[in-house]
Image: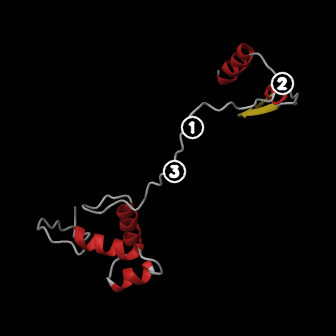
Amino acid sequence: MMGTTLDTEMKPGNRKGRPNYPVEFKRRLAAAACEAGVSVSKLAMANEVNANMVFKWRREFRAGLFDDAPPQTTTKLLPVVLADAPVEVASDVAAAQPTSVTASVMVEIIIADAVVRVHGGADAALLRTIFQSLRA
């Protein structure tokens, strides 16, 4: 190799690593981002972090992933009233009868240069044979 100089000395790179923000900082920003009327972008700019990070921290905060942070979802309970005796429900026999609907069903499957059209109630064994022959 003419004119080539190999440098064996290790030099530190100029790329900054990702900052590891403290959990309390993340929790504080996430809680502030959850407040009504707060602009997440302005909050991120004021704290010199990327807005996407604040959105992520807010999702994690709401999911309860930060220590001591209660989940933001609340469970609502409905009142239950117990009856003394069972209540009969009137059933409509006509409504319980299934109605038959005839519909024209057609499925079209395109595999490479082949087009397979299946109408109505085709036999599963026949379809399996057709698809295996197309695969070959």
Q: Position of residue 83 (x, y in %)?
A: 57, 37
| Residue 20 shows up from this direction | no
**Residue 90 located left or right of residue 44:** right
Which numbered dot is residue 120?
2
Q: Position of residue 113 (x, y in %)?
A: 75, 33
For the residues marked 3 and 1, what is the alpha-carbon distance in whole angstroms?
16 Å
The residue closer to the viewer here, 48 or 89, is 89
Q: Is residue 7 left or right of residue 127?
A: left
Residue 90 visible to an observer of this rendering: yes
Question: Mark 3 belongs to which amino acid?
Answer: Leu
SS type, badge 1: loop
**Which quadrant is home to the C terminus?**
top right
Label 1 crowd (10 A; few <14 / some 14-19 / many >=20): few
Q: Earlier in the sequence, mark 3 or mark 2?
A: 3
Q: Amino acid at mark 2?
A: Gly
Residue under numbered circle 1: 83
Residue 108 occupies quadrant: top right
| Residue under pointer 3 | 78
Q: What residue lies at 38% left-to-right and 84% top-to-bottom?
A: 45
Q: Position of residue 106 (x, y in %)?
A: 83, 31
Circle 3 SS class: loop
Q: Quadrant of residue 115?
A: top right
Residue 85 image offset from top left, x and y in percent? 59, 31
Q: Is residue 19 left or right of residue 58?
A: left
